[in-house]
Amino acid sequence: MSNTEKTVVFLMNKYSIVVKGMEKRMASEGYATVAMTDKFERIKDYADAPCVFIMYKPEEILNTPNGSQNIVLIQDTIRDNDCDMIIVGDVLEEKDIKKKYPQLDKYRWMLRPIDIDKFSRDIKHVFIKQAERREKEAAKKATQAAIPPDEAEKKRQAEEAARQREEQLAREREEELARQRKEAEAAKQREAELVRQRDAALAGQRQAEEALQKQAEEALAEVSPLSGKELDALLYAGGQAGAPAKKKHILIVDDDPSYAGMIRIWLKDIYRVDVVTAGIQAITFLTKFKVDLILLDYEMPVVNGPQVLEMLRQEETMANIPVIFLTGVSSQAEVKRVMELKPAGYLLKSSKKEDIIAFIDSKLQ
């Protein structure tokens, strides 16, 4: 059976850029996708076909009018039609939802932020299991059709088939429980690693800010005092005499806070500069603030540079922001792949300060 005959149905409170990215990945692998934000009774329309349901952020569904009724409707419809479902949410959200709705405990839970490659593998695994179940049901029907008319033999064969099925189901249950335990442990380790990375990033950002503060204080100590009018003029010019009143705004996206802090120091006297250390943080930042250019690291954990660029291109308010890849990746194949996404440019992290500034200046003129 081809992937085009298989459907991934997303159940959520509202459409988001993350779900859009997941849909795009599924479509690229040949699956059909459907998004439901209401009328969840339509789930049964897909129950008889090869289908996997994704309940995205159930806490958001719950926190809406009739939210509890919708959660119950989803779980009951999924259960009554013997469908497969994966739930996507946060660690604290998982505990709360499972406590309120114990029947959801039987379904696989994936933690945010989503590892898109693992998500793709899990979807493929679920469809494989569905195909195996259908083959077993077909084999059962074929066996029943071939049973001889002798009632005693018919009864014996039926009992033997039932025993074998029960043993197989028991083995599958044990394997599934072992797999779930392994995934839960891996998820726990990933969560701990994400916390460690976040703390390291925050510490690095604090160090960079302290270094900037120290440099600013040293610079102020080296200049003669300004009159009140001179100080007002300097502040109005954005911190640089003769500069325009409003600086161009640059966002640096790099999981290495030390390197990002260095680039910020290079640019801070010319541009307004902000730094984030993860792709998802960049998307969140850009929904709140307008920037004139993005310096985007190519290789980052969870969501890498190319994935961030693809998500930007899907959003009308972000699609036209110039993006320059500033990275240590220099292989010909990777450069070719990046340039196919049509960024504003591509610079190596080993580039000299003056070359980086000159290239950015040329893009913001």
Image (cartoon, grey):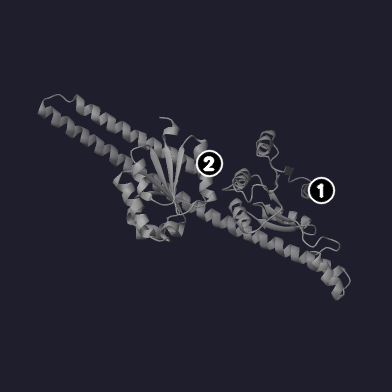
Please state if 91 lies on the left or on the right of 43 as rendered.
Answer: right
Horizontal side of 163 relative to 33 (left or right) equals left
Task: State yes or no: discs 2 and 1 in contact (Cβ < 8 Å).
Answer: no
105 and 206: which is toward the camera: 105
Instruction: Name the amino acid, label 2.
Output: Lys
The residue nearer to you, when weighing 292 against 54, is 292
| Front tag of 2 and 1 | 2
Under circle 1, the secondary element is helix
Q: Mark 1 — residue?
A: 358
Residue type at tag 1: Ala
Q: Residue at x 54, y 53 (%)?
A: 193
Residue 115 visible here: no
Q: Secondary structure at mark 2?
A: helix
| CA distance for labels 2 and 1 | 36 Å
Q: Nearer the viewer, residue 315 or 260?
A: 315
Within 10 Å of disc 2 (Cα), the crowding (few <14, some 14-19, many 20+) is some
Residue that carries the numbered disc 2 in the rendered image: 24
Residue 89 rendering spot, x and y as whole percentages = 46, 54
Marks 2 and 1, the one that precedes in the sequence: 2
Question: In this orientation, does residue 208 appear?
Answer: yes
Residue that protrudes farthest toward the bottom in the picture: 228
Q: Residue at x 37, y 55 (%)?
A: 71
Residue 173, located in which quarter of the rendered image? top left
Q: Position of residue 188 (x, y in %)?
A: 47, 53
